[in-house]
Amino acid sequence: MNRLFRLKEMPLHVMLLPGVLFVLLFAYGPMVGIVIAFQKFSPTKGLFGSEWIGFDNFTYVFGLPNTLNVIRNTIVIAVMKMVGGIVFPVMMALLLNEIRARFYKRFVQTIIYLPHFLSWVILSGILWDVLSPSSGIVNDMVGWLGFEKINFLGNENWFPFVLTGTDIWKEFGFGTIVYLAALTGINPALYEAAVIDGASRWQQTWKITLPGLAPIIILLTTLSLGNVLNAGFEQVFNLYGPVVYSTGDILDTYVYRLGLVDFQFGVATAIGLFKSAVSLVLISCSYLLAYRLANYRIF
Amino acid sequence: MVQHKGLSRTLTTVLIYAILAIISLACLLPLINVLAVSFSSNGYATAGLVKLWPRGFTLGPYEFVLNKPEFLRSMGVSLQRVLYGVSLNMLLTVLIAYPLAKEASQFRMRTAYAWFFVFTTLFAGGLIPSYILVLKLHLIDNLAALVLPGAVPVFNVILLLNFFRSLPKEMSEAAYIDGAGHWQTLWKVYIPLSAPALATITLFSIVGHWNEWFNGLIYMNTPNHYPLSSYLQTVVVNRDLNSLNLTQELQILQNLSDRTVKAAQIFLGALPVLIVYPFLQRYFMTGIVMGSVKE
Amino acid sequence: MIRTKWGSLVLAVIVTAVLVLSACSKNEGNNASPSASAPETPAASTSAAESEAASPSPAENLDPLGKYEPGIGLSTIRHTNSGMKFLNGDTIDSNIYTKSYESELGIKVTNKWVVDDTQYAQKLNVSIVSGDLPDFFEVDPKQLQTLIDGDQLADLMEAYEKYASELTKKIWGGINDGKLDTALSKGKLVALPINGGQTDDPDFIWIRQDWLDNLGLQGPKTMDDVLNIAKAFATQDPDKNNKNDTFGLNMNKNIWDGYSGITGFLNGYGAYAYNPTNQSGTSTFWIKDASGKLVFADIQPEVKVALGKLQELFKAKAISPEWATMDGTKASEFETSGKVGMHFGQFWNANWPLADMKKVNPKSEWSIFPLVSADGSAAKVQSLGYRPNRFIVVNKSVGNPEAIIKLLNYFMEKNYGETRNEDYHIVTQGEEQVNTFPYAAIGGSYADTNQNDYALVQEALKTNDPSTLNPTAKGYYDNILAYRGGDLGQWWVEKVFGNQSTYEALAKYKSDPNNYVYNEFYGSPTATMSERGSTLKDMEATVFTKIIMGAASIDEFDKFVADWKSQGGDAITQEVNDWYSKR
């Protein structure tokens, strides 16, 4: 019986084989390079010939005055993005849910996904124009509202919010999809009963729609925990400058400068490894949480 | 009272429509701006006078770009990359998602396999070891270097395996009773039912390959072999004025790309994705939703 | 249960990966003709072998341009940019240089890879770290140091002394004089500097003459004049459009750029700071203090004064509030659209970004003023180009390093020697002039080529006789006449080589060597510099930017100096002075 069971599983192993081989070679293969984190890496001596220095790279990098600040920036920016990345799509889904005209609903949906498909390289150029204090349309509006114009990209206090805002702007349309779909799963009978009870639209949203969304909101929040150290390299890299390093420099940009600009591969790998380890812990926790709390298996 | 309520209801509706219109506009404006700049004459564009409508209308930038051999050549490379890359992605995604969608009771190793794949999204060897690997495999300057290393898109696998899980179990059981093996069940039952999910991840895969530029720069040895996004990167990114060595190369400086041409290239570069997108959009909802939410 | 399984799986995976990797590397050793050697792939591994095979015969032929029989192959890497033009059918891989290298010298030069300027350093870094190096290639000082540390470079000493032609030696000098001493390491000549010796790179003050005229102002004589002009441009509507929409001084976030940077402004206050934002913090500027020791230019009190003045301008709204987010290109758009009337920058600013401005806006006119000082005396100007920062290095594995010297000899001969041939320099194709000299795999020049051309052009303009001009100078001469005849597109040639031009101003700078301040440190980056440089550079860029923007008080400068010293600066200073005393 047991043998038969195994035999039955054979095709499944076979199906997985090509994928496993690719991943072994191209994902696990280069992971050998993680040893660099424990070496005084020298290009000529190579991966296995370089001098082993234990945790020196870690002590060095965490001793640098910037490192803790960079970690803090990363967490602040990533958490703000996580929160915004949940709140705004939910609000958008609620708004769209109120729309009865199907064409309009469809139209809005199509438009709001668009920014998701443009790369940050391209968007950064556009954002610079849009946010410019002298000629940008956003600051024109700030001006109309009677406020002092804001140097969004050049002000260290504003910069994390600009990162968050632009990230939300780029991704919220995409995030809306999941919530819209979850809305279709809410039992229409609930609304009918509410209307009979004389509940206003606002009350319906508050008492029926939102609670209906709660499980998925909780679920996605849990899942996003693994991203606490992912603040978005491409975006920051294309928008930041020395003037906003103090609040805008994140782990990934820091690693980039240490590694590719400065040749400090050991140090760069060490901090990359630190990041991966923290992410692994968080992902595992979120996996367990989702499983325990929502009885949901992510994968 | 009732009338009052009706009025406020209409007002709210109007307000919601208006808010959504504004939001849509905010998402659309950047593209319109790029488009307007690409059709304007350079003087207006560099002076920052072009907002939403071309000034000094001209097709010049497009003529220039389309006559540039580099642009069309790299477009060709990108198309090839998408063709091979997406095919391979899809094949492997399906083959991995199906077994992993099984319950642990049916397939005992599934959780181990799942972590095996997910682990790779957290840890990476980094640029240098990856480069050394590609070098040792003699894939440098070969399209395969842009296709093979990313052959297994783990995120797509997770989406698809969740979608597979959400399919009614009765169907695969029925197929099993009819004597179908795993391969037949996958091919005859799962694939036909998964069009929305497959369409969605195909789009992700297309967009991923189309927009990826860094590997193109690192793994390709001549600009002739760059995919479009890598080529655009060299065009769009501004050069470091510090590193210019100008004492002799006076004329060279003058020929650096101007802004309208950049905009035209950006637009043309984004165009294929913008065209593909609406066709796949209707599958989106079902695709993503079923992939990530399961009751 | 699952956990242990998983653990063993991971272990198995890692072991497999290691096996796979090592198998691959072994495979390469055994397999001489790998599958990937498609026709277009430069056969890098074979070229080294070829050159090995063709090492010079016992009876040495010391002809600087002697041909290899049989021929040898050398691989290199190249960077290009969108401004580089090619004659019909030519490419960077196949052109007049590559063809004659092969036919006349018996050296087949192949490009292992070619990349845009902007990506060269990064791609080369990857190659260096992966050990995937060509036979000879261009590096910056930091890369040079890495390669020296890794002992990867060939010693060119003997090859240079034996094979360098008279012409080459005239420009590069002997081993211990001239610029070669920047490429010496432990008694070996590890590189050939391909630039340096140039003094064309100090800043000028570029000012909109039409704005000055509109406001009835004179050109600056002192730094106070500069400040006043900047403020007037910002407040007195110099473009007469009745809108308060102009600024006085243009800057961009990379403050050490040769266009809209702050170098010239700082020079005006006797400050010589330099530490480019996009580099690794190892190209720094060192000057001698009163006691004869080298000190870091960026922490001197003069810098504080200059930053304070910039802050004053910023607070007076004479500098755009956006400057710290604009790069050079954005700043140039700001300027060519007529929003700002002054910047500090080098001679080529006429060429870019101002070249087309005259055509778009014929009323605009830029004047060039030499740098002024706070007290009105002539300012000492800073030159970085005097010290080389680009080098050609030769891979240690190359069997006949003298071949690279021959390539250099060949370039010098065809461009400056007795058999000078314009086909190797500039060729006219249809209406445009195509520079062919950048195709050369290794080149160099007399430091004062442009300056000499300027003198020739001026002479010809005076005598109306262009007959003695070399083709390059003739091109400038024709373009100046065209500009004077109404072709506004040629405005920049007038500005660079004509009357009141940048080279006229440079001639004045150059008339007295004491006008210049050079970097006194030209060794390789020191250990602490390599390690701490980028952190210190980031700190400096942040503090300077904030001070100028008024986001930090000017006294933050003192804190920066203290931090710089304590976070590695003192060690760097020590190392730099050690180098200086041993030099």
Image (spheres, coloured by chain):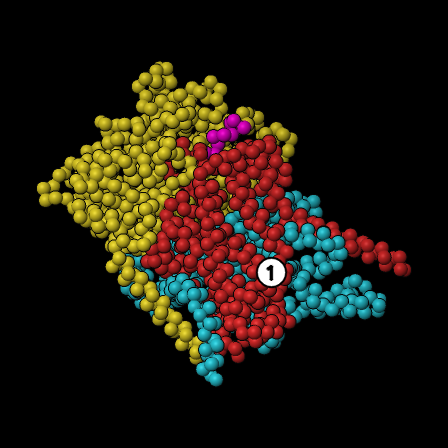
Chain colours: A cyan, B red, C yellow
Judge whether residue B173 can be spotted in this image: yes
On the image, the x and y values in percent for residue B225 come to 41, 46
Q: Chain of mark 1?
A: B
Locate the N terminus of chain B and report the quarter of the image it occupies.
Answer: bottom right
- What residue is shown at x 54% (from left), y 33% (from top)? B60
The quarter of the picture where residue A62 lies is bottom left
Amino acid under disc 1 = Pro
The quarter of the picture where residue A59 lies is bottom left
The residue carrying mark 1 is B196
The quarter of the picture where residue B288 lies is bottom right
Q: Residue furthest bottom?
A: A1
On the image, the x and y values in percent for residue C325 come to 53, 46
Residues shaded magenta: C352-360
On the image, the x and y values in percent for residue C283 come to 36, 47
Position of residue B256 relative to residue C211, above or below, is below
Position of residue A97 relative to residue C316, above or below, is below
> Badge 1, how many Cα within 10 Å: few under 14, some, many 20+?
many
